[in-house]
Image (cartoon, coloured by chain):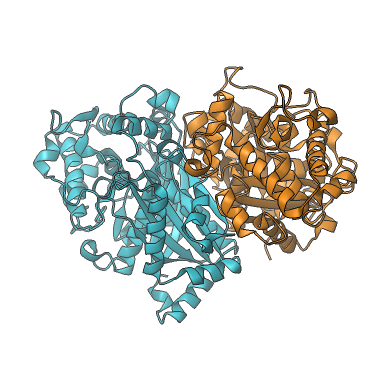
Chain colours: A orange, B cyan
Amino acid sequence: MNKNIYILGGEQTDFQRNWAKEGKSFVAMLREVVDDSLAKVDIDYAELNTLNKANDVAAFIGNFAGELYNKQGHFSAFFTEINEAFYGMPCGRYEAACASGSIALEAAINKILSNEIGLALVVGVESMKTVSPSVGGDFLGTAAYYDKEAKGLDFPFPKLFGKLADVALARYKIDETRFMDALAEISTINYANAKRNPKAQTRNWFMNKEHASKRGGEFNMDVGGRICITDCSQVTDGSASVFLASEEYAESYAKKRGISLADIPVIKSWANRIAPLTFDKKVAESKGQPYILPWTRQAVLDAYKKANLSVDDIDLFETHDCFTSSEYVAISAFGITEPGKEHEAIEEGIIDFKGIKPINPSGGLIGVGHPVGASGVRMMLDIYKQVKGVAGDYQVENTKNALMLNLGGSATTNMVFIVGRS
Amino acid sequence: MNKNIYILGGEQTDFQRNWAKEGKSFVAMLREVVDDSLAKVDIDYAELNTLNKANDVAAFIGNFAGELYNKQGHFSAFFTEINEAFYGMPCGRYEAACASGSIALEAAINKILSNEIGLALVVGVESMKTVSPSVGGDFLGTAAYYDKEAKGLDFPFPKLFGKLADVALARYKIDETRFMDALAEISTINYANAKRNPKAQTRNWFMNKEHASKRGGEFNMDVGGRICITDCSQVTDGSASVFLASEEYAESYAKKRGISLADIPVIKSWANRIAPLTFDKKVAESKGQPYILPWTRQAVLDAYKKANLSVDDIDLFETHDCFTSSEYVAISAFGITEPGKEHEAIEEGIIDFKGIKPINPSGGLIGVGHPVGASGVRMMLDIYKQVKGVAGDYQVENTKNALMLNLGGSATTNMVFIVGRS
C-alpha cells in the first residue's frame, strides 16, 4: 500500500565520549553528527541548501529531556546554529521518552509519504553527563509517571525493570537460577558484541559471564531488586542521525552517484503502540495473557503484517535492552520463542552474534550506550548498516531483513521498524 | 495535490482557571479537555475504542516544557491515564516551543495523508502556574537560546520582543508616538475581543486604551524595553484539542450524523519555516530586506500558494500576539499592508473586530491567554469555529477562509494554517 522509504545512511558519535568533560554542549554534538552524516551520504551543504530552496527537505530531532539535562527546549531550532543551509527548513522536535528517536523517524516517514518532502534528516541527541548519576536518574524518572513511580526514589527505572523480572519469574514459573543466568548471558553477549563496535561506550570495559552472574556487593551493586549494575545500560552522551528519502529522491540520488536504487535499504514497515503508563497497570492489563507486555508484541505483529514478513524472514534484531529484563521479554515478543521460554533461546545460543537470530550485534543499549533520545535513531542506523552490509566488524553476514524495537518508559511507547531491500 | 484534512471540532478549557490552585494537575486538564472534545464532536469512548481496534486513530500531544513546569516528560503516555480506549493507540509528543501545538497538528496531518489513520486527536496542553512568575519566565527562556539569550535575565522574552519593537522603529523610521500608539491599540483590541470570549483568561480584566498607552510605573510595569505589562500575553494554564479526519472518515462521520460533508471545515494548507535561532541572527539575516522576519512572511506565502489563495481571500486571522510587537509585524507578513505601514491598518480600524481584516476575534494570546504548548491548537480550534459559524459572541460573520500564525521562540518556528470550506 505505502511507498518505500529509502535510507541513504547516517552516522553516530562515539558513545564513549563525555561531552561535558570536553567542554562541549549538545550543540557541538549536533553539529558533528550532522557534518559527519552529510559526508557519509555524500550530500554537501550546497545540495542541502538547493533542496531547502525548493522546500523539499525537512529536519527532525528526537530528544528526551533537554529541558532538564541542558536547560534548553526548542531543540529543532538548533539546526540553524550549525549551518545557514537550515534557515527556512521545516523542523520539529519529537519526544516519547526513550523512544524519542523513533517518534522523530515516524514523523519524517509520514512527511515523506504525504508528498511534502523528498529528503528528511532525522537526528536523535541526548547530552546527559551534565549532571550527577543520581540527579540524572531522577530526571529519567520523568519518562515514567514521575509523581507515582519515581518521586523520591533512587534510580526508579532499574526498579521498574526489576519488577518486570519479578513478574516474568512469577508468571512463567521459570527456575530462578536459570532465569538469572539468562539475564547474565544477555549482558555478557551485549558487552561482547560491543567490543566489535568502534563507537560503543563499553568497548574497552571489563566484562565476563562470571562478573555478570555475581550480583550484589561493591563490584556489581544491586540497583533495582534483581537488577544489578551489569543488567543496566549506562548513562551516555551521544547523537545519531539518518537521512530518509522518497523513492523519487532516492532514484535521482542513486543515478547521480552511479549506484543502484536496489542497493539502497528501505524501511518496509513501522508500528507505534502505547501501553498503559504505569508499570502496575501494564501488569494488571496483561494478567492471564501469554505476553506480559502485549502492546510490545502487538507492535511487532503490526510490523510483520505490514511488511508481509514473519520472524522467519528477520535475520537480526536490534532491541531496547535498557535492562536485561527488557531484552528477555523481547525475545518472545519477536516470536523467537513462546513467552516464558526465552531462556531456552539464550541457552541454545540462538541470539548470539553467530546464532541464527542474533540480537544486538551492535552491543545494544547495554553495550553501545543509551543516550536516551538518540537510541531509536542509532538502532535505525545499525539495522540500515547491517542490511547495507557496511557494519564492519559487527556485520552479520547475509542480512536481508532486520527489525528494531525501541521502547519509551517502562515499555509504554512501543515502536518497531523493519528494514530490508526493496 | 494533497487531499483535504477535515476538522470535526474540539474544545478548550477555560483559560481563566488556575489548576494548581484547584489542586489539579495537567492530567486532570488533559482528561477534561478530551472528554469535552469527544462530547463536542459526538464521538464516544466506545467509538474511539472501535477505531483503535482497527488501528485507524492516533493521538498527538503538543507540550512545551512539562519537564520544567510539571517535572514530567513522555506526555503522550498520559492519554492512557484518561481512558482505556487509548490503550494501544499510536501516540507521540511534539515540541517547538510556543508552536508545539502546531508541530503536533502537522504530524497528525501527515499521518492522515500517508493513509496511516482516518482520525487524529490533537491536544495541546500546558500547566504553567505551578511555579512563580519569575521562575516561569526563566523556564520560558528555554524557548530561546537559553545560554545566550535568557540565562540570568528577568523575563527574557519581553526583552526579545522589545528588541523587535526597536528594530521595527529603526528600520521603518516610524514616528515613535504613532508606533507606540499602534501597539497600545493592538493590546486594547485583543482585550476588548476577549470580553466576547467565554473561555478567555482576561474576559473580566480591566483594560482601556488609556491604560495601555500609559507605560511604566506601578500600574503598567516596563518588562522589556518598550514592552510593558499591557503589551504582554500572560502566563496561563490551559488545554485545547481538535479532531482531524481523512476524507474517507469524514464522509462516514457526516453520513452517520446526517450532516453534509461540505459543512465540515477543512485545512486547506499549512507551512513550517524555521528562522535563525537567536534574535540577533534574525535581524542580521534580514538586514536590508523589506521584512524583519522574512521566514514568517515566507510561511504565510507558502500557505497562500498551497491553498491557491491570497490575502484578499482571507476573512480573518488568528495571530501569535505573545507581545504587541509580534502582532504588529504579522500585519505585513499577512500582506494586509506593506512592511513598515502596519500602523496605518491599525489606525484605520482594518484589524478591529468589525474591520475588514479582523485579527484575533478570539482575543488572541494577549486576551485569551497563552498556555504555551496549547496555543497552536487553540488557534486552530478558533479558526475552525469561525469557518463553521459556531464562534458565538465572537463570531465574525461570513467567514469563508481564516488563517492562523503560530510562532515558536522569537519567531524562530513559523507555522501557518489556512482553514476554509472544501
Where residue A299 sits, quadrant-wise, is bottom right
Which percent across, then down, holds residue A42? 72, 36
> Image point 45% across, 49% down: which residue?
B62
| Depth order, front residue of B178/B23 | B23
Q: Measured along the vertical axis of the image, is residue B420 above or below residue A264?
A: below
Left or right position of A416 against A195: left
Q: Residue A221, how many percent across, how many down?
A: 69, 27
Q: Is residue B127 visible?
A: yes
| Rendered location of residue A206, percent (x, y) | 80, 23
Question: On the picture, is B226 further left or further right than B142?
Answer: left
Compared with B181, A215 (above or below) is above
Asked where in the image residue B394 lies, by quadrant, the reply is bottom left
- Camera-side residue of B377 and B353: B377
* Left or right: B247, with A245 as reference point: left
Residues A197 and A247: in front is: A197
Identify the residue at image location x=50%, y=71%: B46
Outermost residue toward the left?
B210
Q: Can residue B402 be seen from the camera position used here?
A: no
